[in-house]
Amino acid sequence: MFKVSPLRKRQFLGGIIGLVLGISIFYFFTRKSSETYISLGPMNAGHEDLSCFTCHADAKGNLWQQLQSNISHAVGARKDGVDFGTQDVTLNNCLGCHDRPNDRHPNYRFSEPRFKEAVKKIDARTCITCHSEHHSERVTVASIDYCMNCHQKLEVENDPLDIDHKTLIANEEWFTCIQCHDFHGNHTYKVPTKLKDTIPMKTIQDYFKGSEDPYGTNKKYIGLSQDEWLKSLEK
């Protein structure tokens, strides 16, 4: 009678346990209710109700095909690798909900040759330069003096501000720009003519971290909800 060695039994049992655990873990982490456990951090202000798949779509092909392609790429048998698990998040993910024709600073503008030097300092061609996700904030750029990169030679005809823009630029008071103007120009509100009436810097900083909007609630455009975004894909 053929006798199975104890080692072979342990290997077989270990394989079965590993397979069951692997399937269980895969099933758990692909459930919608498990998104909290696998997220890199809390969603940014305004994105709290979005599901992971809104930005992280499944990569093309099955996991085995993705693995084979990336191994081939690693050993030089394939020119490019492929996304593994989920597709990389790109600018198009953001524009799917937030693209609008009246943006004061549309991202494509910064691909113009005149902004070649500016984008070396702050790359405004991509949203995540200022809006890095999973930080529970609205704006995550390190410093809010970014206007200096493009507006060093700004001249305002019939300047209405009590301390004119030329003086503010000469004094390098770039943080005052955002106290009057929202970057994308999406708010409809009356810009103050006296510097003392501008939005306090602390209020701006709190807004960037997710607090109430100091520019007001009258907006020219509202980003799509997840349901609206899904419907737009059906068109």
Image (cartoon, grey):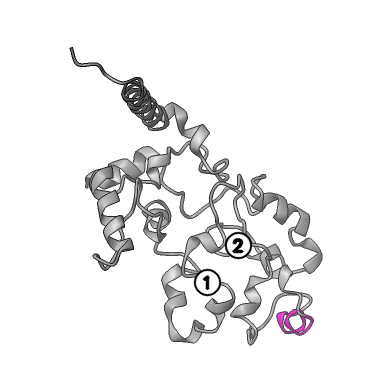
> Which of the labelled discs sits on residue 182, or is there none?
2
| Residue 154 x %, y % | 63, 84
What residue is drawn where x is 38% and y is 43%?
Answer: 54
Q: Check disc 2 and give the amino acid type.
A: Asp
Report crowding for label 2: few under 14, some 14 to 19, many 20 or more residues within 10 A (C-alpha): some
Q: Residue at x 70, y 63 (%)?
A: 179
The percent position of residue 30, horizontal first and vertical second, equals 38, 32
Asked if marks 1 and 2 touch (Cβ < 8 Å), the reply is no
Q: Is residue 59 magenta?
A: no
Q: What's the magenta region?
A: 164-171
Q: Position of residue 61 (x, y in %)?
A: 23, 47
Identify the residue at horizontal 31%, vertical 44% (top origin): 58
Q: Answer yes or no: is residue 185 visible.
A: no
The one nearer the camera, 92 or 177, is: 92
Indicate left or right for 67 with 221 as reference: left
Quadrant for the N terminus, please.
top left
Name the residue at the top extreme.
1
Above or below, 47 relative to 170: above
